[in-house]
């Protein structure tokens, strides 16, 4: 018989509907006392249904809700105690969709093993086989308490795969792949009866009740397969190989099974282990979207694949048995044909032998990503969801580990990538997992040691991580300081519960975590308050999207800056060059300790963030540069844009000393490179005072990186005055220049490379050295005029558009912009 399943039409035998039935002790089915007809029977699946890919013909109760739609048997009631169904066919197995009433008319764990009834199977030769129905064995209750699963029957609702980004259900249920209306403790119970005499024709099946517990029979399907159709083997990972280019249009469906996950393959190319782009989720690989699958289903199921213009269809059992199967342009192969085994992984520093945290990635030769246990295989990069422990860098997933992890890896060849911040040489290599192997040791080597030069790295701008995750990721990225910022997003307040007013208890000797704040006004701007000892409220005002709908401007950003400094904290103007509304006045008036480069690095060409930064320097402002990520998802790595701050030779590494170094301006911002700048023996952040008509200043800048650099240049008052291109290896570049300083100016150094990191090209940008001729600071008239116009606009906004409940706040904001105007005019004349 070509069709393995034969549903039986039971419609002529239906003798009951979903309404309750009175018995001597009340009602047969559980229901509220005030509405005895509101039984669980009304919610049972009906109509032509597929359960585990098997067809069942149930009554369509939506057509006639009050019509008979079940076979119900019970002793001692108004219904019959047995019903005989004529079959007239052979079958290897008989599949029943049935259930019984609960003990005590409700969900309970009582009654396990109780004799409920039986099926009497009569064959054409007159012989009879009786199959006992025991509660929680062959049959189970209509309402079942959590955790009270049956032993020999299955729920009709198998778990349905839900993509991680499915927004039709709550985020939590999406993690376990179960739709909210799906449960393995509700609906019909499916029982597979194996026929001891499959060569005999089955004449009839009689369902019989043993007592006053009713049995409800919804459907019978004859099965002509030798094995239990509900018994699916464990889930397997497979990789697709498709002739031609299917683009992103790979559609996979599974009959009698489920595609539990569909993701990209990161196929290693020949140069995967040798490319210089290691560490940044790219280079030496080909990404094939939709060609990595996790499949769970019957061996008799079929994978139907539509890839571009090509189609393919393969039996799942063929893939399992032969490790691969193909049809037309499509080939399906097991990712782990020799099986998997658990391995303990340990990563150590090659020089010290000590365990070190890393960002790590494992993949198969086909490009299937293997996540360490406890980590996400399908890394979620949505805003404010599932933060910490994992990340994606330019689409490639990684896991953060503390130097060790456990992972289930396939026997055979595995590719591994190990990354640790900007100062270690990232590793890509192949390893061979041997049968029975339990341990895997990996090493990573430090190439640059900035701490030996008193430079300590930090991220000035992090959101949503827990303090513990901050430490884990800081260790893995070789990042010394994490500023985890509480904030407000309308009605959402984040990380306030992590605030301690000091170092987080998760801090360690080399990794300091301090929870502070980013205060924000929708129009006026954002401001980061680092090193707070007390929270500063309100955290946001001025309306959405920062404050809640209808909010007014309650305080000035200058007020927040003043309070932060009163507490000894560090005031940072985040993500240069925007937002720049009140920030413009506050920077001019000296209310900022640093300007943050974030996510607009552009490489060789000077970008908008740098131009915005230069504007302040060109109007006489001393303003150190810092780097931060504004990390708000697993789509950014911690410290992908970071600050290196140089402590004095006699200073030990503490959070306070790091902040002091930022204030002094002995800093550079980096996305992967290092840079140091000296002018006449004066380091970054320092002043050189020249008299009269100025003089010549000897400038030296050195850039280095574990990734290739393309060039280094010197910037004076926003313009490049010297550039050194790189030939060959390009890991270390030095530029020397004699600067003729005839007027006051500032000088900074920047370097860049071609390889793209998490935050942009490999780059670094120093804080300036300030050269003051004749006692004045640098001042470029065009930038001064621009800012004067900006202050005029701020006054106009405050007078006409801004929403204030307290007029004193409006007046103080106008006064702030006016004061900044006067300061700019004073500098222009000095």
Image (cartoon, rainbow, N blue to C red):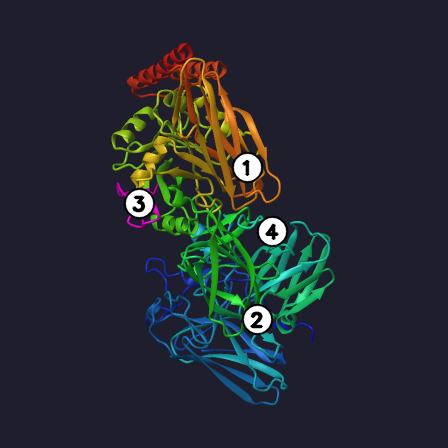
The residue to which callout 2 is attached is 12
Residue 260 seen in this snapshot? no
The crowd level at tag 3 (other Cα within 10 Å; few <14, some 14-19, many 20+) is some
Q: Earlier in the sequence, mark 3 or mark 2?
A: 2
The crowd level at tag 1 (other Cα within 10 Å; few <14, some 14-19, many 20+) is many
Quadrant location of the N terminus in the rendered image: bottom right
What is the CA distance from the residue labelled 1 to the residue labelled 4? 18 Å
Coordinates of residue 607 in the picture (x, y in percent):
54, 30
Q: Is residue 597 left or right of residue 720?
A: left
Quick one: SS at disc 4?
A: loop
Quadrant location of the C terminus in the rendered image: top left
Q: Is residue 656 above or below residue 59?
A: above
User: Which stretch did the figure color magenta?
Assistant: 493-514
Q: Earlier in the sequence, mark 1 or mark 2?
A: 2
The residue to which callout 4 is attached is 275
Q: Earlier in the sequence, mark 3 or mark 1?
A: 3
Please identify, in this view, whether the residue under mark 4 or under mark 3 is nearer the observer.
4
Coordinates of residue 783 in the picture (x, y in percent):
48, 17
Q: Nearer the viewer, residue 154 or 591?
A: 591
Image point 46% across, 26% down: which residue? 613
The residue to which callout 3 is attached is 498
């Amino acid at each position: 018989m070509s069709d393995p399943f034969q549903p039986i039409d039971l419609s002529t035998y239906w003798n009951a509907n979903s309404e309750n039935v009175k018995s001597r002790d009340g009602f047969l089915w559980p229901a509220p006392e005030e509405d005895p007809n509101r039984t669980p029977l009304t919610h049972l699946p009906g109509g032509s249904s597929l359960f585990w890919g098997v067809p069942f013909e149930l009554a369509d109760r939506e057509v006639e809700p009050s019509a008979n739609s079940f076979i119900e048997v019970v002793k001692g009631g108004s219904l019959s105690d047995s019903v005989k169904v004529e079959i007239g066919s052979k079958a290897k197995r008989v599949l029943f969709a049935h259930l019984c009433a609960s003990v005590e008319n409700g969900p309970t764990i009582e009654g396990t093993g109780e004799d409920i009834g039986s099926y009497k199977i009569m064959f054409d030769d007159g012989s009879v086989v009786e199959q006992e129905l025991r509660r929680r064995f062959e049959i189970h209750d209509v309402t079942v308490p959590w955790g009270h699963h049956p032993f020999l029957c299955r729920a009709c609702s198998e778990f349905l795969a839900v993509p991680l980004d499915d927004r039709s259900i709550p985020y939590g249920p999406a993690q376990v792949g179960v739709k909210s209306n799906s449960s393995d403790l509700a609906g019909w119970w499916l029982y597979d009866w194996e026929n001891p005499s499959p060569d005999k024709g089955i004449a009839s099946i009689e369902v019989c009740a043993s007592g006053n517990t009713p049995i409800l029979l919804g459907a019978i399907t004859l099965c002509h397969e030798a094995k239990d159709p509900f018994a699916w083997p464990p889930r397997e990972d497979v990789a697709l190989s498709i002739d031609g280019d299917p683009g992103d249009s790979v559609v996979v469906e599974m009959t009698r099974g489920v595609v539990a996950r569909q993701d990209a393959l990161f196929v290693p190319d020949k140069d995967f282990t040798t490319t210089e782009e290691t560490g940044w989720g790219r280079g030496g690989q080909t990404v094939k979207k939709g060609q990595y699958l996790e499949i769970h289903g019957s061996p008799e199921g079929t994978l139907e694949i539509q890839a571009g213009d090509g189609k393919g269809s393969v039996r799942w059992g063929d893939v399992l048995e032969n490790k691969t199967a193909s049809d037309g342009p499509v080939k399906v192969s097991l990712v782990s044909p020799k099986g998997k085994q658990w391995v303990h992984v340990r990563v150590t520093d090659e020089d010290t032998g000590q365990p070190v945290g890393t960002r790590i990635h494992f993949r198969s030769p086909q490009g299937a990503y293997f996540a360490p246990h406890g980590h996400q295989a399908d890394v979620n990069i949505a805003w404010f969801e599932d933060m910490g422990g994992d990340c994606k860098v330019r689409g490639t997933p990684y896991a953060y580990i503390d130097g060790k992890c456990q992972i289930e890896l396939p026997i055979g060849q595995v590719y591994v990538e190990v990354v640790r911040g900007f100062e270690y040489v990232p590793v890509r290599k192949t390893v061979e997992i041997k049968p029975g192997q339990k341990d895997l040791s990996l090493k990573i080597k430090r190439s640059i040691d900035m701490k030996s030069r008193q430079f300590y790295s930090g991220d000035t701008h992090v959101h949503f991580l827990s303090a513990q995750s901050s430490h884990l990721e800081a260790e893995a990225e070789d990042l010394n300081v994490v500023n985890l910022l509480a904030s407000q997003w309308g009605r959402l307040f984040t990380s306030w519960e992590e605030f301690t007013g000091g170092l987080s208890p998760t801090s360690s000797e080399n990794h300091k975590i301090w929870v502070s704040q980013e205060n924000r006004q929708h129009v006026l701007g954002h401001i980061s308050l680092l090193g707070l000892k007390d929270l500063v409220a309100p955290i946001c005002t001025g309306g959405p999207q920062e404050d809640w709908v209808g909010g007014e401007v309650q305080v000035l950003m200058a007020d927040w800056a003043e309070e932060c400094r009163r507490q000894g904290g560090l005031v940072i103007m985040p993500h240069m060059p925007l937002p720049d509304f009140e920030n413009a006045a506050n920077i001019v008036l000296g209310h900022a300790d640093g300007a943050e480069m974030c996510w607009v690095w552009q490489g060789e060409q000077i970008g908008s963030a740098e131009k915005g930064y230069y504007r302040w320097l060109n109007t006489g402002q001393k303003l150190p540069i810092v780097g931060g990520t504004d990390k708000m998802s697993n789509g950014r790595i911690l410290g992908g844009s970071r600050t290196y701050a140089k402590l004095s030779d006699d200073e030990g590494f503490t959070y306070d000393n790091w902040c002091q170094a930022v204030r002094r301006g002995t800093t550079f911002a980096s996305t992967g490179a290092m840079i140091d700048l000296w002018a006449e023996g004066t380091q970054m952040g320092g002043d050189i005072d020249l008299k009269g008509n100025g003089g010549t200043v000897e400038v030296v800048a050195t850039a280095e990186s574990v990734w290739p650099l393309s060039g280094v240049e010197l910037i004076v008052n926003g313009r490049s005055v010297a550039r050194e291109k790189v030939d060959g290896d390009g890991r270390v570049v030095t530029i020397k220049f004699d600067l003729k300083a005839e007027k006051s100016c500032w000088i900074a150094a920047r370097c860049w490379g071609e390889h793209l990191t998490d935050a942009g090209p490999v780059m670094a940008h120093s804080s300036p050295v300030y050269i003051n001729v004749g006692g004045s600071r640098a001042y470029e008239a065009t930038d001064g005029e621009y800012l004067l116009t900006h202050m005029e606009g701020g006054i106009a906004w405050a007078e006409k558009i801004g929403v204030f409940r307290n007029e004193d706040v409006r007046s103080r904001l106008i006064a702030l912009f006016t004061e900044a105007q006067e300061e700019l005019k004073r500098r222009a004349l000095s």
